[in-house]
Image (tube, grey):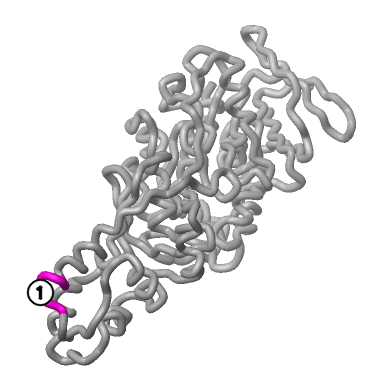
């Protein structure tokens, strides 16, 4: 069977590409349904983009690579598409946009756009041997118990990274890149909870508090969540993408306000109250109990000198911890690293060395922050490849 374009992966980037790549498109996936990561994202409501999406919100060895696609297909373009399909949405926090009702509406929208473009969708289809004769690709597909040999002028790799293997994630995209001589930046889990080997935070499981989390030279101000295994929450997930094994993270528990003057004032008005009681008005009580095991939090607030209170505030604003590791791909929302952008055209997403071979979405070394940015990269990179294919 001959097609103009074969797209491997019916996720966000793949379906977006299929809707724009012109006639003769076949998009395949090994899952039973398309867009499974879309379906489960955002608690089932899909954080489909971010009002503030810009190149500064993405991690890559080449920080400039994403500018072309993001600049030519923006969050506003995708919002227009959502509006055209009558999907109700709302802004949650920090520019994050969610469907009012269900993530399935985004999948249905993409399916409708694919149908309008005439793209065919084959599900429960496995990829076998791939070869290229200089002008066309030949791909062996396993479907309905049979091997089907497909040829295509264009091959688009949109099968994601390694994150959430229970959803069927594999390293297929990296294998295809390696087969055709494209370098791959070593993948690693991103937007992932951090673990501590001594289970030091197990008694705090379920406690959340606002904080500023530093990893490397980057920091994020949002909530942190203590878990049975360690730390999670938006600020920790964000910082995890900048953290490396063996490094420390620093947590500022009082970034949202000036604790020192508050404690000095309460020393005058609530002098007889225990220091831990007063602190519990500013931080979760269970967290204060935990901190009292590593900081001297004894006596009444009236007994604390300015120097003692200053040292306490310094500790709370610079709490240094060394994670044992992350929870890995099992719970990681994205995969960092991937196909080296130096091997791709930033305008078309096409390989510089293999004509007709494209890589889009998560399998490329472009990773967004938490909050709809990775979906925007999927839309933008998928659109860019689709436009290039249609034009050719």
Q: Quadrant of residue 328?
A: top right
Q: Residues within 10 Å of mark 1 (few under 14, many from 20)?
A: few
Q: Is residue 306 left or right of residue 156?
A: left
Given residues 203 and 236, the one toward you in this image is 203
Give the magenta range: 304-309
Q: Residue at x 46, y 47 (%)?
A: 324
Residue 144 visible to the viewer: yes
Say if the magenta span includes residue 296: no
Given residues 344 and 330, the one toward you in this image is 330
Label 1: state its secondary structure.
helix
* Position of residue 268 measured from the top left corner of the image (x, y, whole percent): 12, 89
| Magenta-colored segment: predominant secondary structure | helix
Residue 193 visible to the viewer: no
Image vertical order of residue 139 relative to residue 59, above or below: above
Q: Which residue is mark 1?
A: 306
Q: Quadrant of residue 270?
A: bottom left
């Amino acid at each position: 069977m001959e097609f103009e374009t074969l797209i491997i992966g019916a996720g966000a980037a793949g379906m977006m590409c299929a809707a724009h790549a012109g006639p003769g498109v076949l998009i395949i996936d090994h899952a039973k349904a398309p867009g499974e990561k879309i379906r489960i994202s955002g608690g089932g409501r899909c954080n489909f983009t971010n009002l503030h999406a810009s190149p500064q919100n993405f991690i890559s060895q080449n920080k400039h690579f994403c500018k072309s696609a993001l600049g030519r297909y923006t969050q506003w373009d995708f919002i227009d598409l959502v509006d055209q399909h009558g999907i109700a949405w709302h802004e949650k926090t920090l520019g994050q946009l969610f469907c009012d009702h269900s993530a399935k509406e985004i999948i249905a929208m993409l399916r409708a756009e694919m149908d309008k473009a005439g793209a065919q969708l084959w599900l429960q289809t496995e990829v076998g041997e791939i070869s290229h004769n200089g002008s066309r690709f030949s791909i062996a597909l396993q479907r309905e118990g049979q091997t089907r040999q497909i040829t295509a002028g264009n091959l688009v790799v949109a099968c994601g990274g390694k994150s959430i293997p229970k959803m069927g994630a594999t390293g297929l995209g990296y294998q295809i890149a390696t087969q055709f001589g494209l370098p791959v930046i070593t993948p690693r889990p991103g937007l992932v909870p951090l673990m501590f080997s001594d289970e030091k935070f197990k008694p705090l499981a379920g406690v959340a508090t606002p904080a500023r989390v530093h990893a490397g030279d980057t920091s994020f101000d949002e909530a942190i969540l203590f878990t049975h295994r360690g730390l999670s929450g938006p600020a920790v997930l964000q910082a995890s993408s900048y953290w490396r094994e063996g490094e420390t993270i620093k947590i500022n528990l009082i970034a949202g306000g000036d604790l020192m003057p508050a404690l000095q004032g309460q020393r005058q008005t609530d002098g007889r109250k225990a220091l831990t009681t007063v602190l519990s008005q500013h931080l979760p009580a269970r967290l204060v109990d935990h901190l009292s095991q590593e900081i001297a939090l004894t006596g009444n607030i009236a007994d604390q000198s300015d120097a003692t209170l200053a040292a306490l505030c310094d500790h709370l604003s610079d709490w240094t911890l060394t994670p044992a590791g992350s929870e890995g791909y099992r719970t990681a929302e994205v995969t960092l690293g991937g196909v080296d952008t130096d091997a791709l055209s930033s305008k078309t997403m096409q390989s510089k060395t293999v004509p007709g071979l494209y890589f889009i979405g998560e399998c490329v070394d472009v990773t967004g922050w938490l909050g709809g940015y990775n979906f925007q990269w999927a839309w933008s990179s998928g659109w860019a490849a689709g436009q290039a294919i249609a034009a050719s």
